[in-house]
Image: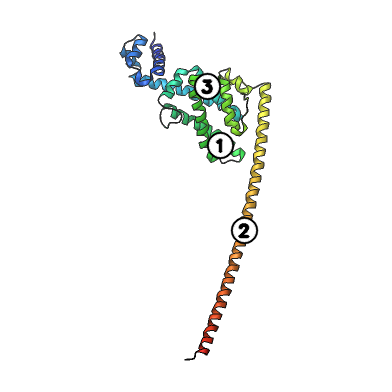
Amino acid sequence: MSGSERREQLIQISRTLFAEKGFDGTSIEEIAATAQVSKPVVYEHFGGKEGVYAVVVDREMQKLLGMITEALAASHSLVKLERAALALLRYIEESSEGFRILVRDSHAASGTGTFASLISEIASQVEDVLADEFAARGYDPKLAPMYAQMLVGMVALTGQWWLDVRKPGREEVAAHLVNLAWNGLTGLNPNPRITATSRAQTAAAKPPQPRGTSEKELRELEKARDKELKEAEKVRQRELKEAEKARVRELKERERLLKEAEKAREREEKIRQREARLAERAARLEQVDHPE
């Protein structure tokens, strides 16, 4: 066995052991014994357990990140979301050991660890997608980072759950994920399905160019998106008009209150002056009735 072949063998054996027992539960002795080599051979290739673990983790992170990045290259936002969800679930299905290693030392909601750093990197890519969508729909693009964390966290936690249960199937899980993320609770589709374009993408290493029905479906998605944008713009314009009307009403009400306050001050001044005159008159009468 050549040096490169031996190195690859040690990586694969270590990957299996780390997935099963974790970093702390795996020893150099066990790696060497499983590979039927002496401990110095492992040290020669990786320098120690930390070295081989770092190689295994880096491989898994690059593999998953590459799949997600490729999925986000789709043209339509709905298809991007579908393909990203399918990519994660496909990775879990095909590389269960690798995913167990990534999530063993941290979970999607934590702020530290291998998986948390991976989630943050994916969220930064999703953030750019959401920022464009928000801008097109008249929403504040500054909110994109927060929504990216929400969206990626939802998908990642679902993936961790699906790692063990594996039911329902990959496409059905992805369809329900997208259903919630795309339609929201108030618009849930009771029978969601992944688009033909995304289904075709999962069948090959590279996403095929959509043809026939897929192109038609994408055109329909674009029409639906344009319709949504127009509706969103109408709502935005209506809200702006309502806000302007409310502002005008507020200004008029403020002006009315100012006038009322001014009239009240004038009345108070007249009353004060009248009381002053009456007091002065009373004082004069008092002097007449009781001269010194």
Q: Is residue 274 visible?
A: yes
Q: Is residue 73 visible?
A: no
- Kindly report which numbered mark, 3 or 1, lies closer to the viewer in this rendering: 3
**In the depicted structure, whether residue 130 falls above or below residue 248:** above
> Would you name the residue on which mark 2 appears?
253
- Cα gap from disc 2 to disc 1, whole angstroms: 39 Å
Query: How far apart, in angstroms, are the residues tagged by discs 3 and 2?
Result: 58 Å
Q: Please give the name of the residue rendered at 51% of the width and 86% of the height, measured from the top-left corner.
A: 286
Q: Earlier in the sequence, mark 2 or mark 1?
A: 1
Residue reaching furthest front?
A: 289
Which residue is at the front of the view, 171 or 6?
171
Amino acid type, label 1:
Ala
Name the residue that disc number 1 marks: 131
Residue that numbered label 3 is attached to: 89
Residue name at image x 52 percent, y 22 percent: 89
Residue 179 occupies which quadrant of the picture?
top right
